[in-house]
Image: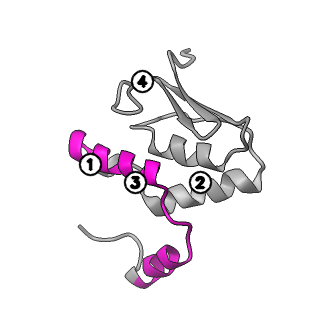
């Protein structure tokens, strides 16, 4: 598959980005083992960018629309303060399977239903 990003730029970004957390790595690996289209998961570089954006705006709550397996939601939760919350409308795709995950003191909720028009 042809890359969208020059290899030198991707190598630079990897060298200068935060390391992927253990919980995110485990979820990404599980996604690749268990899902039909695992390439839809957000990768470590994109996850690091989401964390930076959440820090920049000092987010305390996030509503993620279009959750696949929850990788980006976990990345965002790691960037929030202790009282932070991430809500994810239910999509029926893989983990977090329990519907509620914790990242330290932060919670990631799988909401039952998104608002439909």
Q: Nearer the viewer, residue 108 or 35?
A: 108
Q: Secondary structure at mark 4?
A: loop
Q: Residue at x 73, y 35 (%)?
A: 83
* Label 4 environment density (alpha carbons within 10 Å; few <14, some 14–19, many ≥20): few
- Residue 80, how many percent across, how many down? 69, 45
Q: Residue furthest front?
A: 104
Residue denoted by label 2: 50
Is 36 contained in the magenta span? yes
CA–CA distance in space, label 1 to label 4:
19 Å
Q: CA distance from mark 3 to mark 1?
A: 11 Å
Quadrant location of the C terminus?
Answer: top right
Q: Is residue 113 left or right of residue 25?
A: right
Q: Which residue is mark 4?
A: 98
Q: Nearer the viewer, residue 2 or 84?
A: 84
The answer for how far apart the CA atoms under marks 4 and 3 are is 18 Å
Q: Earlier in the sequence, mark 3 or mark 1?
A: 3
The percent position of residue 71, horizontal first and vertical second, equals: 45, 44
Q: Report x, y in % for residue 19.
A: 51, 65
Density class for disc 1 (Cα within 10 Å; few <14, some 14-19, many ≥20) is: some
Identify the element where label 3 is drawn. Answer: helix
**Residue on which disc 3 sits:** 25
The label shown at residue 32 is: 1
Quarter of image, res 6: bottom left
Is disc 2 placed on a helix, strand or loop? helix
Whichever of labels 2 and 1 marks the residue nearer the N terminus, that label is 1
Q: Which residues are magenta?
A: 8-37
């Amino acid at each position: 598959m042809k890359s969208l990003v020059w290899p030198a730029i991707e190598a630079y970004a990897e060298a200068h980005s935060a390391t992927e957390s253990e919980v995110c790595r485990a979820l990404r690996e599980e996604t690749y083992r268990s899902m039909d289209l695992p390439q839809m998961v957000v990768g470590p570089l994109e996850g690091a960018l989401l964390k930076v954006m959440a820090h920049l705006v000092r987010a305390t709550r996030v509503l993620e629309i279009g959750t696949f397996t929850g990788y980006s939601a976990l990345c965002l939760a790691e960037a929030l303060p202790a009282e932070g919350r991430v809500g994810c409308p239910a999509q029926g795709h893989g983990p977090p399977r329990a519907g509620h995950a914790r990242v330290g003191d932060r919670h990631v909720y799988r909401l039952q239903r998104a608002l439909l028009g």
